[in-house]
Image (spheres, rainbow, N blue to C red):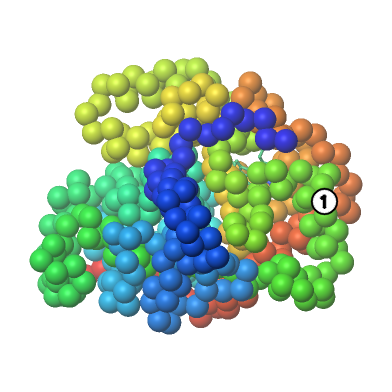
Amino acid sequence: MDEHPVESGIPLRRSAKVLAVVAFVVAVGTVMAVEPLRAHTAPPVADMPAGIKVPLGIPADVVAAMIPVDNPMTPQKIELGRELFFDKRLSDDRTVSCATCHDPAIALTTADPVSIGIRNQKTARNAPTVFNSMFNELQFWDGRAVSLEEQSKGPLTNPLEMGMKDHDAVVARVKSITEYAPKFTAVFGSEGITIDTVAKAIAAFERTQLSGNAPFDRFMAGDAVAISASAKRGWDLFNGKARCISCHAWNPSSPFFTDYKFHNVGVAAKDRNFTALAREALRVLQSNKNLEATLDELALREGTSELGRFLITRQPRDIGAFKTPTLRDIELTAPYFHNGSEKTLLDAVNFYDKGGEPNPNLDGGIRKLSLTDAEKADLVEFLKTLTSDDVRGAMLNQKPQTREPAR
Ligand code: HEC
Ligand code: HEC
């Protein structure tokens, strides 16, 4: 059903892992074939620090396998990462933290169609949730970061987001906050405060932000009445007539409703002169020394943002293609799409029903669906069963973040 060529952007760590498994099987498979393979390939689940519960519907062995060996999770590191994530002093004018845009009161997103950074500057993209982001094969709507560690370095210095001059300035700022030095020493020893240790601590915290235990998970675990008859019809449509499953993939070992691939469903296609935008982006990219920072700026800037995956691959077929997002907690994270252009779930369903937005790069999987009003309502009911009880519950105990400057 997916008429895309295979993505070239498979992150190294995954392919390396697969190769290691293959090598292992070849090397010892005949000798110790009775041993379960998993015991040798994934670190033991006990590596998850105490106090972190893997929720129903999320396989614990997948969680364990996704924790990088060079950034093990410890309670102290997680706590340090949590403090950094909520610390507005990491932004140029001390008004914006990671949590400003990934607010626990709104399922680690905001209600703004596009994110707003320091000095009320508008970016061109909607903030995705951080829940389950540890499972993303690539980070960002266009996949320009290969890990959570790499991802977290972007917003700190993006001029529209937290606006620090460069990573040295971030390190200097963290060093100027006296309470951090002993904490970094306790967690990272003599390495102390560097941009990499800042990123590692934040990523370790993010890996504790898991979302499962939704009515759908209980339904799949055998509780036949966990979701309504309407939602069950919606799940059938999701798998059938509505064709959603072809990109929003679900299976027990990757239960996140995404194929982690990039598709042009037409959201970016309205009123855009892609040829001119692509030419401008290529000119800027070719003339610039700091490729990473330049990419990050182009990605969040009105106009070039809409090029999507093209900015990274420079393949014309990737123009207007964005990463398939998870649909977990989707009821809580309106508005929708990479630019926040659809207000409600029904609006998003209507967008698909009409066959997206025609454009030369429209994904082959997108076509007119001719759903009835009742079918659309069933699909929306189904999408609402993907809301985690834990995430919804935690939201009720949170005050929204403010932009009052930190002292
Ligand atoms: C001004 C708002 C803003 C701030 C501040 C911000 N983010 Fe984001 N975040 C966004 C937006 C918008 C995106 C999507 C950008 C893109 O795809 O190009 C994003 C993407 C992400 C992603 C990728 C999720 C995915 O599904 O691909 C993660 C993880 C993340 N942010 C974590 C952080 C961390 C950690 C910080 C602090 C160091 C932070 N963010 C600061 C708005 C913000
Ligand atoms: C061809 C692949 C594909 C198919 C088929 C598909 N989607 Fe998507 N979906 C995507 C991509 C890619 C995005 C992000 C697009 C963007 O923002 O430019 C997305 C975004 C969404 C969003 C917004 C998520 C968010 O966090 O903002 C919702 C809701 C959604 N899809 C639901 C559905 C439903 C329901 C169906 C079936 C009717 C469906 N999708 C079919 C690929 C697909």
Q: Residue furthest front?
A: 31
Residue 326 in the image: state x and y as whole percent. 59, 54
Instruction: Please tell me which residue lies in front, 373 or 111.
Output: 373
Tell me: 227 left or right of 84.
right
Tell me: 391 left or right of 96.
right
Dividing the image into 4 quarters, which one contains the C terminus?
Answer: bottom left
Density class for disc 1 (Cα within 10 Å; few <14, some 14-19, many ≥20) is many
171 relative to 269, above or below: below
Tell me: 214 left or right of 59.
right
How many marks overall? 1
Instruction: Please tell me which residue lies in front, 214 or 288.
Output: 214
Residue 13 in the image: state x and y as whole percent. 39, 48
In this rendering, does residue 53 appear at all? yes
Mark 1 close to ligand 2, CB under 8 Å: yes
61 relative to 123, above or below: below
Check disc 1 and give the amino acid type. Leu
Write the residue at 19% across / 46% down.
166
Q: Quadrant of residue 367?
A: top right
Find disc 1 in the rendering and name its residue. Answer: 237
Write the residue at 80% across / 34% down.
368
Give the structural element (helix, strand or loop) at label 1.
helix
Write the residue at 77% across / 74% down.
222
Instruction: Please tell me which residue lies in front, 16 or 374.
Output: 16
Q: Quadrant of residue 234?
A: bottom right
Residue 79 in the image: state x and y as whole percent. 31, 75
Write the residue at 59% across / 29% down.
5
Residue 353 in the image: state x and y as whole percent. 78, 40
Instruction: Please tell me which residue lies in front, 108 or 75.
Output: 75
Dividing the image into 4 quarters, which one contains the N terminus?
Answer: top right
In this rendering, does residue 134 appear at all? no
